[in-house]
Amino acid sequence: MTSSDKPGNAADAPAETTGAAETGGATAVASRDWASAAADPQYRAAVVDLLGALAYGELAAFERLAEDAKLAPTLADKAELAKMASAEFHHFERLRDRLAEIGEEPTGAMEPFVAAYDAFHKQTAPSDWLEGLVKAYVGDSIASDFYREVAARLDKDTRELVLAVLDDTGHAGFAVEKVRAAIDADPRVGGRLALWARRLMGEALSQSQRVVADRDALSTMLVGGVADGFDLAEVGRMFSRITEAHTKRMAALGLAA
Amino acid sequence: MTSSDKPGNAADAPAETTGAAETGGATAVASRDWASAAADPQYRAAVVDLLGALAYGELAAFERLAEDAKLAPTLADKAELAKMASAEFHHFERLRDRLAEIGEEPTGAMEPFVAAYDAFHKQTAPSDWLEGLVKAYVGDSIASDFYREVAARLDKDTRELVLAVLDDTGHAGFAVEKVRAAIDADPRVGGRLALWARRLMGEALSQSQRVVADRDALSTMLVGGVADGFDLAEVGRMFSRITEAHTKRMAALGLAA
């Protein structure tokens, strides 16, 4: 499944009509390269935060997917989840290498985000294979939405990396098929998984808000306001776009979210 | 660390002077391609077994390394173990794809070996990070020795695949450095890890012997005797070469094995 097949991407609402154009900051950055954009220390700090957050997110996702692969009912299913885990690891490598390339110690850049991701995964350990599949799909989709949201606010070089990693997501497509089949076989499964999906999104939002509150430079950049200060309402709108896209996807999957 | 840096590879004793040349069977197969060699149903069955055993071994190794990554004391260490896990997954993919290419259902080919690998990993779950590193290094090295042993007994096409996967092992080099440093810092660690390494090798041999007893075609091919029937003594010599190489490596690592 490529990202264009996915119903209800948050990026259906183009970035130009949302935060980026309103402040003008994103457009200015988007036409610059890293060397030029990074001369602004606040922008540089925001990108280091972003790369650190994405890198640890990928490493944590690798670890969880590898763990969830144990729940697989067949060897072929196990291999599919292991494949996703391996893809996440390669994303991690690219993001970590980029941090090193711009002269940042990758571990230091990742550390501020360890607690939030670890708490998320601890709160959302799947209790069975189907919950694991829904989590893989939801996680993959939210990551893809987030990468799209943020791409427009980045300098050319960083954007290129983020879009390259994005291009390589969508490994969770197989999950959709399996979940649909399970709901067809027993519609009660749908109710349980809908609750599960809602809990996943709730935990994701709760941990994201923690990060937003802690990391001013990152949050400011995310809403396109590098030059203009922090706009909490715009952060709210971004979360709301991602949540709406999630809701549409869950409905398409047969889960009322 | 490339495989040529490793002390005491079993392949230091060239295959020509051991099983292969004695029976002549390996030489005959070695000059043929898959299509020609696979006309012999016993050879075909042996290769399907071999690819199935290697494939599940890689998938199981992926799963265990990903699990052991949790024991890592730092994010950088975690990333190193995740990298090894990911490399094992890619080996799995190549072996699985090859099974599909020759018209075999990969899951069916792997099933006969699931119990032995799972039992091995269950019996050898590391209790801390250093035990995990020693296991990664020992496992990687034994796999490399075994791939070398078997390569000489395979048709050209299968050999090419096995050697390609072998070329990509040696990811455990970083483990050597970490283990040496830990022993330098506290020599008592060496005694504990030496016992651990001995237990790993003991379990590996015990599970291998189980496989040898169960899978006649595979065992016969491993000792170069496709045409000449099963030679238990030659299986014993192969195990003994691999054990000797292991002992030398452990000594080089500062562990009396």
Image (cartoon, coloured by chain):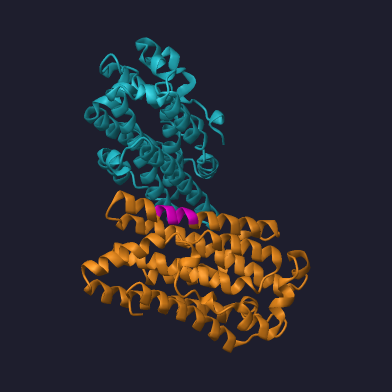
Chain colours: A cyan, B orange
Range of residues picked out in magenta: B82-87
Residue A230 in the image: above or below residue A54 = above
Which of the pair B183/B138 is nearer the observer?
A: B183
| Position of the C terminus of chain A by quadrant | top left
| Drawn side of residue A178 relative to residue B174, left or right | right
Q: Picture coordinates of residue A213 (x, y %)?
A: 22, 28
Q: Disc count in the image?
A: 0
Q: Picture coordinates of residue A8 (x, y %)?
A: 49, 25
Q: Is residue A20 visible?
A: yes
Quadrant in which residue B11 is drawn: bottom right
Q: Main secondary structure of the magenta part?
A: helix
Q: Residue at x 24, y 32 (%)?
A: A210
Q: Residue at x 52, y 49 (%)?
A: A80
| Position of the N terminus of chain A by quadrant | top right
Q: Residue at x 70, y 70 (%)?
A: B44
Q: Picture coordinates of residue B3 (x, y %)?
A: 49, 65
Which of the pair A103/A89 is nearer the observer?
A: A103
Q: Residue furthest bottom?
A: B233
Q: Residue at x 21, y 69 (%)?
A: B186
Q: Picture coordinates of residue A197 (x, y %)?
A: 39, 37
Whether residue B26 appears in magenta in the rendering, the answer is no
Which of the pair B229/B10 is nearer the observer?
A: B10
| Drawn side of residue B79 relative to residue B101, left or right | left
